[in-house]
Amino acid sequence: MLKNSALLSFLLIILVFSQFVCAKSVTFLHVEIIDIDLENLKIKVTTKDSILDLQVASDALILRGEQQVTLASARPIAEGIYQDALVYINQDGVVTILHINFKCEERKSKNGTELVFSDIFGKEKKIIPL
């Protein structure tokens, strides 16, 4: 419950902040991070519609839950297993806030044991039988 309230607070702050910069074009996206380039501060992400290469600000706020983390922690977990994130892209097209998520749980089902990967909103995105 605390995680959901923290996420809701984060989203509300972003939405309120967005209203103050409504004269400029800003974007808030849910993405999967498929690659990172630490040297050039870039991330390659997928949305439901496209693949994007995004520049990350050197002073970007990068969070996992409520903990501040580094961009390196956004790397793919394994081939085909990516972390999702909420990204805030400013009017210059640069990521200034990156809220990273990786949730994996083991569960028993009628088919046996499986790993269940969920996105930042709790929606199941991948199931792997064990």
Image (spheres, rainbow, N blue to C red):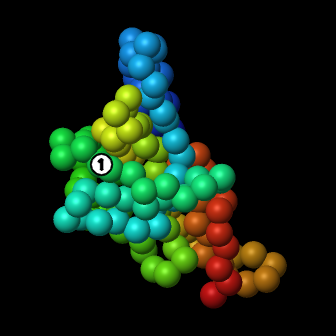
Give the quadrant of residue 117: bottom right
Which secondary structure, mark 1?
strand
Give the quadrant of residue 66: top left
Q: Few, some or many C-alpha atoms within 10 Å of disc 1 (few <14, some 14-19, many ≥20)?
A: many
Residue at 66 percent of width and 59 percent of height: 124
Residue 18 relative to residue 73: left or right: right
Residue at 40 percent of width and 68 percent of height: 35
Q: Which residue is mark 1?
A: 56
Question: Is residue 9 shown above or below 21?
Answer: below
Q: Is residue 83 visible?
A: yes
Which x, y percent locates residue 104? 52, 67
Question: Is residue 26 shown above or below 1?
Answer: above
Front-most of 113 and 56? 56
Which amino acid lies under the numbered mark 1 shown in the image of this protein? Val
Q: How many marks?
A: 1
Front-most of 96 and 54? 54
Quick one: quadrant of the C terminus?
A: bottom right
Which x, y percent locates residue 53? 42, 56
Residue at 54 percent of width and 46 percent of height: 30
**Residue at the bottom extreme, as displayed:** 130
Question: Is residue 67 shown above or below 4?
Answer: below
Residue 50 relative to residue 43: left or right: right
**Residue at the right extreme, as displayed:** 110
Which x, y percent locates residue 51? 55, 59
Residue at 54 percent of width and 77 percent of height: 80
Which x, y percent locates residue 49? 66, 52
Q: Is residue 16 visible?
A: no
